[in-house]
């Protein structure tokens, strides 16, 4: 691969595939450390495809990583081949001022737009209502764990559930890489007792589901939510168009379905918007008003 070293400044992310020792001894500023041996199970740590990525590592690592990333619709816009300490010294001299030492690693991924919106606009209100307690969050169908980890880094106590062991492994790796405390649980959400009613007698302050739908669970979640808590849901909706996926109507919301299920809640957001590939996504955020016990 022809090296154009200035391309790293134009990429959406610089992926350094070397081991921890080599990375910490010197890496390009704004690099993301993603060791080659975990790359293939770490798509949840990358920006959405078709982002442009610049790779750093030895020749074999870069060639194999490039093929893998291409198969996942990413664009590799350049690379820096480091086969020896001599190579590293040369490039550090040629790119003086663009290197640093240490463990710092740039985060390339983002949470879902709904979770980001909730954190920006509603989480401070929820935190203020809890008298210093950390918000207790349940993430249903957590997938690669981005939303769970992001909420944990915002000071929430998070329980995240998914039935896929391989997906949960990625989520745990993501949490570990950022020092986030998340309680991950692997079970089938259709089975009894998979979804906890509470944690040590405390109901959940926030329940989220992103790109997941199990409509049989929704009435149960409505009851399990604490007074003053929030429901956040974001997934695909049927507006009379054929979608590339999901095709099963069981996984598609119907218009106003969530508003009906969570009747009695104060609805803050019930919005349909198209994502980049054109599919319609329904974002729903609602508040379970506390009961006046006076």
Image: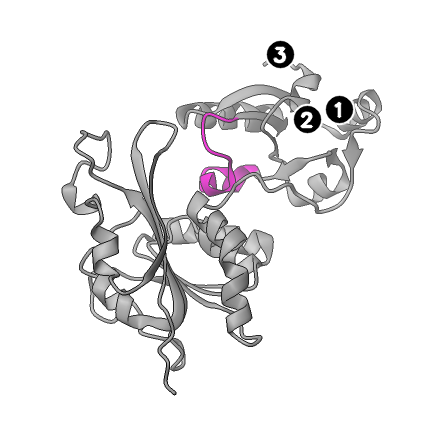
Kind of element beneath mark 2: loop
Give above or below for 219 relative to 175: below
Q: Nearer the viewer, residue 245 or 178?
A: 245
In the picture, measured across the screen, residue 264 lies left or right of residue 229, that is left
Residue 44: say if magenta: yes
Q: What residue sits 31% from the left and 63% below the top?
A: 265
Q: Can you name the residue that lies furthest to the bottom here? A: 294
Question: Is residue 53 something that shows in the picture?
Answer: yes
- Picture quarter with the C terminus: bottom left
Q: What residue sits 46% from the left and 27% below the top?
A: 69
Asked if disc 3 and disc 1 are in contact, CB closer than 8 Å, the reply is: no
Residue 190 position within the rendered picture, expressed as x and y whole percent measured from the top left: 20, 61
Q: Can you name the residue that lies furthest to the top here? A: 2
Q: Which residues are magenta?
A: 36-51
First-in-chain label (3 vs 2):
3
Asked if disc 2 and disc 1 are in contact, CB closer than 8 Å, the reply is: yes
Q: Nearer the viewer, residue 218 or 40?
A: 218
Q: Quadrant of residue 287 in the image? A: bottom left
Residue 119: say if magenta: no
Residue 110 position within the rendered picture, expressed as x and y whole percent measured from the top left: 51, 42
What crowding class fits label 2: few (fewer than 14 Cα within 10 Å), some (14-19), or many (20 or more)? few
Kind of element beneath mark 3: loop
Residue that badge 3 annotates: 2
In the picture, measured across the screen, residue 9 lies left or right of residue 51, that is right
Residue 171 position within the rendered picture, expressed as x and y whole percent measured from the top left: 45, 52
Question: Is residue 214 something that shows in the picture?
Answer: no
Residue that badge 2 annotates: 83
Residue that badge 1 annotates: 87
First-in-chain label (3 vs 1):
3
C-alpha gap between disc 3 and disc 2 = 15 Å
- Picture quarter with the N terminus: top right
């Amino acid at each position: 691969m022809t090296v154009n070293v200035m391309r790293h400044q134009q990429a959406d992310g610089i992926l350094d595939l070397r081991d921890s020792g080599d990375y910490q001894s010197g890496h390009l500023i704004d690099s993301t450390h993603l060791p080659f041996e975990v790359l293939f199970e770490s798509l949840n740590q990358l920006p959405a495809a078709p982002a442009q990525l610049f790779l750093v590592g030895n020749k074999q690592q870069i060639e194999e990583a490039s093929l893998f990333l291409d198969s996942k619709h990413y664009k590799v816009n350049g690379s820096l081949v480091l086969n020896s300490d001599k190579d590293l010294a040369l490039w550090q001299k040629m790119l003086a001022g663009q290197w640093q030492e240490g463990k710092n690693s740039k985060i390339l991924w983002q949470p879902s737009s709904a979770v980001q919106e909730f954190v920006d606009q509603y989480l401070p209100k929820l935190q203020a209502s809890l008298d210093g307690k950390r918000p207790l969050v349940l993430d249903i169908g957590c997938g690669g764990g981005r939303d769970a980890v992001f909420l944990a880094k915002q000071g929430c106590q998070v329980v995240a559930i998914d039935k896929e062991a391989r997906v949960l492994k990625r989520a745990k790796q993501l949490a570990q890489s950022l020092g986030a405390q998340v309680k991950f649980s692997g079970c089938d959400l259709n089975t009894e007792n998979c979804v906890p009613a509470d944690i040590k007698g405390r109901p959940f302050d926030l329940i989220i589901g992103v790109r997941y739908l199990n409509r049989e669970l929704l009435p149960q979640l409505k009851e399990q939510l604490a007074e003053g808590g929030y429901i956040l849901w974001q997934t695909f909706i049927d507006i009379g168009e054929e979608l590339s996926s999901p095709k099963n109507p069981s996984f598609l919301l119907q218009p106003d379905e969530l508003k009906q299920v969570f009747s009695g809640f104060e609805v803050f957001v019930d919005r349909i918007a198209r994502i980049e590939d054109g599919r319609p996504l329904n974002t729903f955020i609602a508040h379970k008003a506390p009961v006046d016990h006076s």
